[in-house]
C-alpha cells in the first residue's frame, strides 16, 4: 500500500477513513497529488475522477443525497475550488454533507505572482458550517526558523528537540481542525471546507505511514425537545380546529404510516404535499397550486389555518407562499433538526426533533380531537379540481403540459425520479405520481446548474432505476455532466426542448420582442443528438404525441448504455396552455 510521504496528507486521509467517508470525488491537478495518492491507494474509499469541478461537486452532492453521509471533494489550488461553489451553496441550503479538501500552496507563495494561486482561506464564507486552513508540515531545516530562534540551536540535539516539538504542535492542531470540520459535516448535515497547503515535492511516496491517529467516535445528531414544550404544543394542537401541514423536500420513508394515517383521519387537518415531499396518502392534498390558484377572497379566508406545521426543506409552490404570507396562521411550527425557515413570516416555534418522533410523542399524548369540517370542505374542492384537470389535459395540444402528463404516467414503478429546476419541477407539481416513485430536485438554491450531474451521482449511489427530466437550457448548461465514466446503463435522461427558457414566457413581461427572445427566453436551435454521439448515449427524439407514446415504451427497455429522449415542443404555445389551465379548473 502506498502513502504520500507528506504527513499532512496522511493525516487528512487517515481521519477521513476514521470518520467513515466512503466516497471521494477527485478532479485532476498537481497540487492535490498527495491527497490523490492517499485516497486512491486506500481500499476504504471509492474514488471517482471528474475533470470539471462544477460537475464533480454536483455529482458528489447526488451521492451524498442518497447515502446521507459526507462525501469528500478533492481539487487542486486556484480557481478549481471556485467551481465547487454552486454545489456548495446547494448543499448548504439542502442540508447535504460535503467535505471540500482543497489543496493550496504555502502561504509565502500566495499573491507573489505564482500560478494557480488565489486567496483560498474562508473562500465559501457563510455557505459552509466550518472552514479551516491547516498548517504546513515543518522541514528539518534551520533556515525555516525565525532569526531570533537560531541562537538557541547550539547542537544537533537541541535542534532536533526544537523541530520535533514544533511539528508535534502542528500535527495536534491539524488533527483537531480536521476532526472538528468532519464532526460539523455530520452534526449540521451540510458542507465544510478544509484547505490543505502542500510544499513540493508532491509525488513522493512511502510504504509505511509516519503518523498515527486516535480513532474518533462518529457523532450523532441529537434532538432537543422536552416535556414542557410537548405540553404547550399539545394544548394548541388539540384546541385548533383548522390545522394545516405543508411538507417540503423530505426523504422517502421519513414518517411511519401509522402517523400518516392519524393525520389523515383527523378532520381538522389538511396535509399539503409536494412531489419532493415523498409523502403519499389518498387523503392528503398533492398538487397545491391546483387548490390554491383559483380561489377567491372568501375561500382564502376559509382556508386560512389557525395552526401551520411544516416539515422538510424548501417549498416549490409560490402560490402557497403568497397565500400564507397574506393569511397568516396564529402559530407556525417547523419540525426538524435543520434550520427552521421563516418562509411565511409567522414562525413561532422550531421543534428540533425528527418529524416521525415528534408525531409519535404528540399522538401518544393526545386526550381528545377537535370537531371540525375544515378538511371535508376542501375534499370537495380537490375532487372537482382533479376532474377538471383530467378534462383539460385530454383536450390540449402537444405542449409541455401534455408531455409531462404522458411522461409522468410512464415513469417505472419502484424507481427514482430526479427533476431539473425551473419549469420542469413546476409542471411535475401539477400531477400525481405513483407512490413507489421517489422524487428529488435541487431546491436548496433552485438553480438550473448541476441538475444532470446530481442525478447521475444519485443514480450511481442508490443503484435504483433513475429517470431525470430537465429543460433544454438546464441540460445544455450542465452538458459536461455526461463527461463521466460512472453513468449507470439504466439511467434515463428526458430533455424537454422548447428552444429556450420557456418559464420566462409565463412570468410577467413583454414577450415576442427581440430583446425578450435574446436576453430572457434565450432562444436557440440546439439539440442533444451530437452530445449523445460524443458521450456514448443512445438517442431518441419525439415531436408529437403519437411518436412520444411510441418511443417511450422502447426508451425504458434494458440497454448496455444510458439513454436520452429529447422532446421538441412549440415555444410560443406552452405558456398559453399553462396559464389557461388555472382559469379552466376554476
Image (spheres, grey):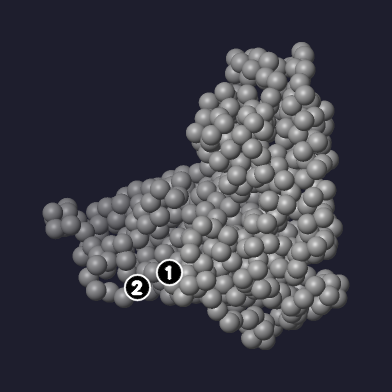
- From where the camera sits, is residue 419 visible? no
The residue indicated by pointer 2 is 116
Mark 1 crowd level (few <14, some 14–19, many ≥20, 10 Å Cα): many
Where does the image place residue 138, in percent across and percent down from the top left?
A: 32, 60
The image quadrant that residue 364 belongs to is top right
Work out whether 226 lies above or below 439. above
> Pointers 1 and 2 in contact (CB under 8 A)?
yes
The residue indicated by pointer 1 is 80
| SS state under label 1 | helix
- Please state which of residues 211 and 78 is positioned toward the viewer in this rendering: 78
Work out whether 182 lies above or below 448. above
The earlier-in-sequence mark between 1 and 2 is 1
Mark 2 crowd level (few <14, some 14–19, many ≥20, 10 Å Cα): some
- From where the camera sits, is residue 201 visible? yes
Q: How many marks?
A: 2
- Give how far apart the Cα atoms at labels 1 and 2 are: 9 Å
In the figure, is residue 70 to the left or right of 402?
left
- Please state which of residues 581 and 183 is positioned toward the viewer in this rendering: 581
Where does the image place residue 144, in percent across and percent down from the top left?
A: 23, 62
Work out whether 85 lies above or below 356. below
Residue shown at the point (78%, 52%) measured from the top left:
389
Label ID, residue 533: none
Where does the image place residue 580, in percent across and percent down from the top left?
A: 68, 57
- Please state which of residues 393 and 415 is positioned toward the viewer in this rendering: 393
In the figure, is residue 380 to the left or right of 474?
right
Residue shown at the point (59%, 18%) measured from the top left:
229
Where does the image place residue 132, in percent across and percent down from the top left?
A: 39, 51
Residue shown at the point (43%, 65%) measured from the top left:
81
| SS state under label 2 | loop
In the figure, is residue 74 to the left or right of 336?
left
Amino acid at each position: 500500500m502506498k502513502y504520500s510521504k507528506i504527513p499532512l496528507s496522511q493525516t487528512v486521509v487517515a481521519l477521513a477513513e476514521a470518520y467513515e467517508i466512503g466516497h471521494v470525488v477527485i478532479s485532476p491537478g498537481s497540487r492535490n497529488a498527495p491527497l490523490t495518492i492517499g485516497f486512491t491507494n486506500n481500499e476504504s474509499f471509492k474514488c471517482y475522477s471528474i475533470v470539471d469541478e462544477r460537475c464533480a461537486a454536483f455529482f458528489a452532492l447526488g451521492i451524498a443525497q442518497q447515502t446521507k453521509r459526507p462525501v469528500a471533494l478533492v481539487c487542486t489550488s486556484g480557481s478549481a475550488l471556485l467551481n465547487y461553489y454552486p454545489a456548495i451553496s446547494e448543499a448548504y441550503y439542502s442540508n447535504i454533507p460535503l467535505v471540500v479538501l482543497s489543496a493550496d500552496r504555502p502561504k509565502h507563495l500566495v499573491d507573489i505572482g505564482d500560478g494557480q494561486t488565489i486567496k483560498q482561506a474562508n473562500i465559501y464564507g457563510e455557505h459552509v458550517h466550518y472552514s479551516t486552513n491547516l498548517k504546513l508540515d515543518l522541514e528539518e531545516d534551520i533556515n525555516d526558523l525565525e532569526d531570533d530562534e537560531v541562537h538557541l540551536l547550539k547542537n544537533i540535539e537541541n535542534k532536533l528537540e526544537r523541530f520535533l516539538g514544533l511539528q508535534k504542535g502542528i500535527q495536534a492542531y491539524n488533527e483537531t481542525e480536521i476532526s472538528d470540520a468532519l464532526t460539523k459535516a455530520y452534526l449540521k448535515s451540510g458542507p465544510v471546507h478544509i484547505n490543505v497547503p502542500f510544499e513540493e515535492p508532491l509525488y513522493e511516496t512511502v510504504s509505511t505511514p509516519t503518523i498515527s491517529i486516535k480513532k474518533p467516535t462518529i457523532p450523532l445528531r441529537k434532538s432537543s425537545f422536552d416535556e414542557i414544550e410537548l405540553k404547550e404544543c399539545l394544548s394548541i394542537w388539540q384546541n385548533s380546529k383548522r390545522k394545516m401541514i405543508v411538507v417540503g423536500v423530505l426523504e422517502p420513508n421519513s414518517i411511519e404510516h401509522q402517523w400518516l394515517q392519524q393525520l389523515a383521519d383527523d378532520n381538522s387537518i389538511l396535509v399539503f404535499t409536494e412531489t419532493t415531499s415523498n409523502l403519499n396518502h389518498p387523503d392528503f392534498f398533492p398538487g397545491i397550486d391546483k387548490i390554491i390558484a383559483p380561489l377567491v377572497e372568501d375561500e382564502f379566508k376559509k382556508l386560512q389555518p389557525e395552526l401551520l406545521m411544516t416539515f422538510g426543506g424548501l417549498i416549490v409552490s409560490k402560490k402557497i407562499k403568497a397565500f400564507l404570507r397574506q393569511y397568516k396562521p396564529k402559530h407556525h411550527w417547523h419540525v426538524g433538526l435543520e434550520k427552521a425557515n421563516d418562509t411565511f413570516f409567522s414562525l413561532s416555534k422550531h421543534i428540533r426533533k425528527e418529524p416521525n418522533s415528534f408525531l409519535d410523542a404528540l399522538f401518544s399524548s393526545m386526550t381528545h380531537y377537535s370537531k371540525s369540517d375544515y378538511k371535508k370542505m376542501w375534499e370537495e374542492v380537490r375532487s372537482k379540481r382533479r376532474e377538471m384537470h383530467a378534462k383539460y389535459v385530454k383536450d390540449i395540444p402537444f405542449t409541455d403540459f401534455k408531455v409531462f402528463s404522458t411522461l409522468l404516467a410512464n415513469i417505472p414503478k419502484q424507481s427514482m425520479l430526479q427533476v431539473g429546476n425551473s419549469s420542469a419541477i413546476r409542471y411535475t407539481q401539477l400531477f400525481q405520481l405513483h407512490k413507489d416513485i421517489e422524487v428529488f430536485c435541487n431546491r436548496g438554491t433552485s438553480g438550473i446548474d448541476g441538475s444532470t450531474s446530481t442525478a447521475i451521482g444519485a443514480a450511481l449511489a442508490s443503484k435504483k432505476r433513475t429517470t431525470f427530466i430537465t429543460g433544454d437550457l438546464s441540460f445544455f448548461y450542465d452538458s459536461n455532466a455526461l463527461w463521466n465514466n460512472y453513468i449507470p446503463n439504466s439511467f434515463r435522461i428526458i430533455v424537454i426542448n422548447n428552444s429556450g427558457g420557456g418559464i420566462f414566457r409565463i412570468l410577467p413581461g413583454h414577450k415576442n420582442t427581440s430583446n425578450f427572445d435574446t436576453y430572457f427566453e434565450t432562444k436557440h436551435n440546439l439539440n442533444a443528438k451530437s452530445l449523445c454521439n460524443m458521450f456514448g448515449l443512445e438517442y431518441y427524439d419525439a415531436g408529437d404525441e403519437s411518436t412520444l407514446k411510441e418511443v417511450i415504451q422502447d426508451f425504458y427497455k434494458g440497454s448496455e448504455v444510458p439513454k436520452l429522449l429529447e422532446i421538441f415542443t412549440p415555444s410560443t404555445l406552452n405558456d398559453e396552455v399553462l396559464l389557461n389551465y388555472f382559469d379552466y379548473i376554476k
